[in-house]
Amino acid sequence: ALIITAIACDHRLHTPMYFFLLNLSVLDLGSISTTIPKSMASSLWDTRAISYWGCVAQLLFFFFFITTEYSLLTVMSYDRYVAICQPLHYGTLLGSRACVHMAAAAWGSGFLNALLHTANTFSLPLCQGNVLDQFFCEVPQILKLSCSHSSLRELGLLVVSSLFGLVCFLFIVVSYVQIFRAVLRIPSEQGRHKAFSTCLPHLAVVSLFVSTGTFAYLKPPSISSQVLDLVVAVLYSVVPPVLNPLIYSMRNQELKGAVWKLMTR
């Protein structure tokens, strides 16, 4: 929330990089708020009950936020690629209109993907009870309650989404390979260290997000267990939104200065 307010209030931060960072902060806040408060309330009140429509809403918003965030991380890797590898074309390729269009495409694709998965998942008949072995409503756990062969449709959607995620991940990797090649040509050792210290943690978080998310949604039922499912869910749903503000913000002197200025007001 501090990051969002600082970027919105400080006109010096009204640039493409910080515009995308503001969107990322909103998505991180949204994805965490969809699952964690309900889990905390359940622990405090010693109940794991959630209504049917509450489960529908939680799945819709969670899927919406995490898929949009992944699309936005792909856009942000392109932003860094243009800034470092093609700085003379930065203003042309990433003008205000282009940035808005890319952000809108990320939000739109995330919402469409979430809507398709939610509608398809809850159109299946659930006949295996009503207990989910997870701290939030998750597609694989809901599919376990279904006794319909139509669940193959949802598995098909998950495979298509995973392929889309793989393409985005490859795009991020290729972008950062080009960035690293450009950074290695920087004569200053301090400049190289600064670039690597930001890029490598970003790649680590994206890799963790992709690998654990893919494993959670596509792993065979034979290796499923309650503890394993819980650990994997935490790794892809909680850890990346927690680390993103640290990686993108706390290591950024301009943003830290804007946050400090906002707080001292």
Image (cartoon, rainbow, N blue to C red):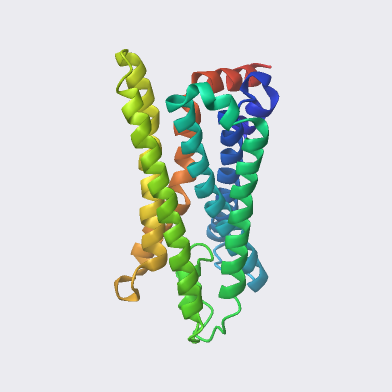
Pick the front one: 83 or 38 = 83
For the point 38% across and 30% down, the residue is 179
For the C terminus, the quadrant is top right
**Residue 62 is at least partly visible in this image:** yes
Q: How many marks?
A: 0
The reply, left or right, for residue 143 in relation to residue 229 is right
For the point 60% across and 42% down, the residue is 102
Pick the front one: 91 or 149 = 91
Image quadrant assignment for residue 19:
top right
For the point 50% across and 86% down, the residue is 148
Q: Residue furthest top?
A: 188
Pick the front one: 178 or 235 = 178
Task: From this view, report whether residue 56 is shown above or below residue 176.
Answer: below
Q: Give x and y (percent) for residue 197.
A: 36, 27
Q: Give x and y (percent) for residue 165.
A: 44, 55
Task: From this view, report whether residue 124 is shown above or below residue 210.
Answer: below
For the point 65% across and 46% down, the residue is 104
For the N terminus, the quadrant is top right
Q: Give x and y (percent) for residue 259.
A: 59, 22
**Residue 145 is at least partly visible in this image:** no
Image quadrant assignment for residue 125:
bottom right
Q: Give x and y (percent) for residue 118.
A: 59, 68
Task: From this view, report whether residue 153 is shown above or below residue 81.
Answer: below
